[in-house]
Image (cartoon, helix red, strand yellow):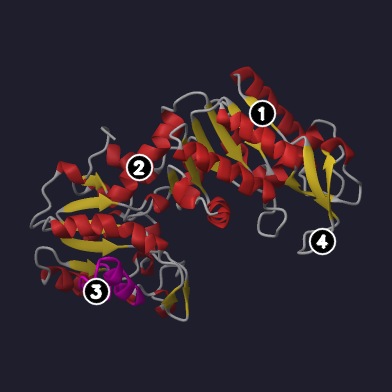
Amino acid sequence: MSTYKTLDDFAPKGKRVLLRVDLNVPMRDGKVTDATRIERAAPTITELVERGARVIVMSHFGRPKGKREPSMSLAPLAKPLSEALGGAQVRFADDCVGEAAARVVADLGDGNVALLENLRFHAAEEANDDAFAGALAALGDVYVNDAFAAAHRAHASIGAVARKLPAHAGRLMQAELEALGAALDNPKRPGAAIVGGANVSTKLELQGNLVTRVDRLIIGGGMANTFLFARGLDVGASLAERDLADTAREIEAAAKRAGCEILLQDDAVVAGGLKAGVETRTVPVDQVPSDMMILDAGPASATRFAEAVTACRTVVWNGPLGAFEIPPFDAATTSLARHVAELTDAGEVLSVAGGGDTVAALAQAGVQERFSYVSTAGGAFLEWMEGKELPGVAVLKA
């Protein structure tokens, strides 16, 4: 983190700290149904409050397309944010720029918190408009970005505003950068990556980057079927992108040149369809019935994958090994997740995971809290694994 300034690099007391967080939480009937992102934003806000800053929280919510949409107002988040801060008062501004915002900010004292209205009510936010960024910057003395989940967006509150004020990484941003840096930029070797999900096409850049960064690449989920097909196997009625067989072979060739071993399943759990209670069979991958679908890696493969990561010091995970949402097709993912958690508990590996399905699968396996770091960043996490420089991170280096 030496290339980024953090909260340790300035004295917050009396400063107006313009803090970009990600409060894009799921809501139903005006109520927050999952406060994870609010809770993850709380430590940075709490630290700034305790150090006497005047904290001005800004975030996007949904996709209002540059127009004021009452159902996407951040007003209902003031209360849950207050609760996450231990009951501290959170003043709400009916806009994120202009008189409404300036008035609320002007009334803040040291250790007070304000929440600005949805940034995306202004089309200038997503356009990375310089004038809009200037209006935001006028509200603060220091800028802090704690929204790694939005760091892949070149928006005004992420990119342009960071060039107008002294820019720092918040604690969540700092933790994400340190975890991902340790996992991919400077990993302890040997390193393994577990990549699953439905389609090869959505993770081509990811796989292309990982084969040059890790020693072992475990491929699962529907995308593994494409690789099996590319190796000449009949995958029956399984989901597979057969038109990408040449691409799969190119990835395997690149891995071989880079000295990265690709591991695919040897056995598979198959069924006639993806539904609860369906009859299943475990078969070798070269004996998949023509009318059946591969829906999970088999137990022998799960054991082989566990043995592969046992020999590693770093494990990065994005995507499940099977259709984990419907038992029993969660077995391989759960088994491997628990094994990686045990290795992490023993201090034998650094384990970093991310992506919506991955987080859900680890939570279902009961091991989310036992990994070294689990990112909820989604798109930003995926782009980081693809080797792309994120706009919200790049600007912190400037």
Quadrant where the C terminus sits is top left
Which residue shows up at 70% across the image and 43% down it? Answer: 223
Quadrant where the N terminus sits is top left
Which residue carries the number 3 mark? 93
Q: Which-is-in-front pick, marks 3 and 4? A: 4
Which segment did they paint magenta? 76-97
Q: Position of residue 279 (x, y in %)?
A: 84, 58
Which residue carries the number 2 mark? 393
Q: Position of residue 24 (x, y in %)?
A: 42, 64
Q: Secondary structure at mark 2?
A: helix
Which residue shows up at 41% across the image and 27% down it? Answer: 186
Going from the N terminus, do you reach mark 1 or mark 2 first? 1
Q: Which-is-in-front pick, marks 1 and 2? A: 1
Which residue carries the number 4 mark? 278
Q: Secondary structure at mark 3?
A: loop
Taking the image as drawn, is residue 398 in sight? Answer: no
Q: Amino acid at mark 3?
A: Ala
Q: CA distance from mark 1 to mark 3?
A: 52 Å
Q: Residues within 10 Å of mark 1 (few under 14, many from 20)?
A: some
Q: Secondary structure at mark 1?
A: strand
Q: Residues within 10 Å of mark 3 (few under 14, many from 20)?
A: many
Which residue carries the number 1 mark? 262
Q: Is residue 22 left or right of residue 164?
A: right
